[in-house]
Amino acid sequence: MANLKITLVKSTIGAVPKHRKTVEALGLRKLNKTVVLPDNAATRGMVQQVRHLVKVEEEA
């Protein structure tokens, strides 16, 4: 099963509160921190919502 490597590259200061909560739910707390999450529909949907704040790489 593939994983997604998600990195927070833009601050959530000034972001919509719903987007802040989504970033936090992804497990991202600080700028430039990375988490590895399973590649499923739920994760993809969350990433799609905050795509302007994160960088996503596919991991084997």
Image: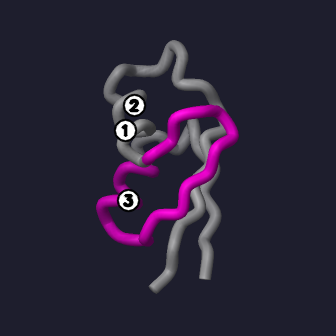
In magenta stretch: residue 44: yes
- Please tell me which residue lies in front, 42 or 37: 37
* Looking at the image, residue 40 lies above or below residue 27: below
Write down the residue under mark 3.
43
Residue kind at label 1, given as amino acid type: Thr
Write down the residue under mark 2.
19
Q: Where residue 39 appears, x then y in whole percent?
A: 43, 71
Q: Is residue 46 left or right of residue 60?
A: left
Q: Is residue 28 left or right of residue 8?
A: left
Q: In the image, which residues are magenta?
A: 27-47
Quarter holding the C terminus? Answer: bottom right
Q: Are marks 3 and 2 in contact (CB under 8 Å)?
A: no
Quarter holding the N terminus? Answer: bottom left
Gap in Å between the C-alphas at discs 1 and 2? 5 Å
- Dot 3 or dot 2: first in sequence order is 2
Q: Residue at x 65, y 33 (%)?
A: 31
Mark linked to residue 22: 1
Q: Residue at x 62, y 51 (%)?
A: 34
